[in-house]
Amino acid sequence: MPSNDFLEQIMKRIIVLLLSTAIALPSFAGGLVTNTNQSASFLRNMARGTSLSPDAIYYNPAGTAFMERGWHLSINDQQAIQRRWTNSTFAPFALGADNGGKETKHFQGNTFSPIVPSVYAAYKMDRLALSFAVSIGSGGGSVEYNDGLASFESAIAQIPAILPELDPMVHYVPYKADIYLKGTSITVTTRIGAAYRISDNFSAAAQLRIAYTSNKYEGHIKDIVLAENQMPFKDLIEDKELDTRQTGWGFSPIFSVYFKSNGAKDGELYDPDADKKQTFGNGWSASVKYEFNTSVQIKNKTKKDVVLNGTSLYPDGEKSEADLPSILTACVSKHLGPVKLSAQFLHYFDEVADNFFTDGLNGNTDEFIFGVDWKLSRRILLSTAFQRSLFELAPQKYRDLNFNSPSTSVGLGISAGLTRHLSINAGCMLTKYSSVTRESDPYNSSTAPGIPGKDVYHRQSVCYGIGLDFNF
């Protein structure tokens, strides 16, 4: 009979991989866990740091002090689609009943977020502006692996590859296993703040951010078939299931400043009283914003769990960290009549935050954005932008549950002034991620020594959005 200790070690590794590892749902735009796609206008031009439209409550809080008197509202919705997949090469995969004798297998997870809403409201007085916003600060969708993952299947695949040498009496057959994993993650953020215009050219703002995180994980390993006679595995391959939810709160301050020269104008809004060639004026504008680290402790609420050697993998009531990192943002814009050129830089202090990616960091994240707004007429504005995101993750720490790689995004869209008080925004943003290869020997820290393997990680995403801005 095969060594029970050996089999138990393998099965324990499978279960720990599947059930004790949270899925990190990467952002669609922004840092490792931070969504910066907070409005439809962002999708057409990601360099929003000098915006004076209602979404300035997020992108340029101090700029709200330069809005016109009265109420400014914005209602937005986005649809986000992301596909991430791993092409994994591991010789024992050829023993799988559904793998066609091939050593390389394609594992894919799909994320679809049909509703990614954001709402902004600001009330501008003489020099003071009060603001409120609700949006999805992180996550916002589900990722589902209907056929499992390479890290899980590789642990099962090595059993029929190795154990015949230990017990030639066992007749091993092409292995089968029902492996399923689904993760849902969302962080809803609320911002409450105030901005004050200190002079005709300068303002400052402070906000309080409240973050509520909710994660849900469901998974199972069942119907594992390794041999015609399953008796040697009877006590080791019983069905395993997980059903747990994690929730938690966090708070952090945000500070920002904004500068505009005398010649700079807010040409983004429709002004029927302006001349035929409404422009952004001539001059400069700039902003700096610092968001402090949001420490979030999430608590398990577990319905189904797995116990190994008397230890629960997701103990009900246990807490873990899911921080949102601090972010430094700087933006500068040059106004050239009907054209506004913007350059923006973001630095994410990922090494300070404690979350899913902490163990795999090589450094912090940087983003560089260049955007153009072109006012075709008093009513029509066209925008486009380019964004480059540089993540510092060690390839050898990549796992198919949570990985990210340098990416390039392109945005395009339109803003149309319907009336003095109402504008509509529409945009689309495409993101292409660099492929990353990880080779390991033994593969995935395999219990069986001497079997190497390779993973090639891929991701791509697209976001669409539409929004309505009200000013009255």
Image (cartoon, rainbow, N blue to C red):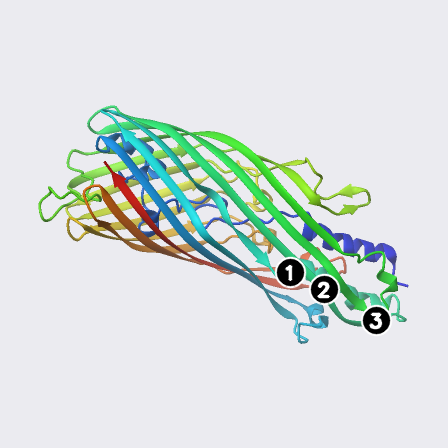
Residue to which mark 3 is pinned: 228
N-terminal label among 1 and 2: 1
Q: Give the spatial CA distance, label 3 vs label 2.
A: 14 Å
- Estimate how packed mark 3 is, as few (under 14), some (14 to 19) or many (20 or more) residues with alpha carbons within 10 Å: few
Q: What kind of element bears circle 1?
A: loop
**Which amino acid type is shown beneath numbered disc 2?**
Ala
Residue to which mark 1 is pinned: 148
**Residue 407 is drawn in which quadrant?**
bottom left
Above or below, 270 against 248 in this view is: below
| Image spot of residue 182 (x, y percent) | 60, 54
Cβ–Cβ below 8 Å for labels 1 and 2?
yes
Q: What kind of element bears circle 3?
A: loop
* Quarter of the image that includes the C terminus: top left
* Relative side of 162 to 87, left or right: right
**Residue 266 is drawn in which quadrant?**
top left
Cβ–Cβ below 8 Å for labels 3 and 1?
no
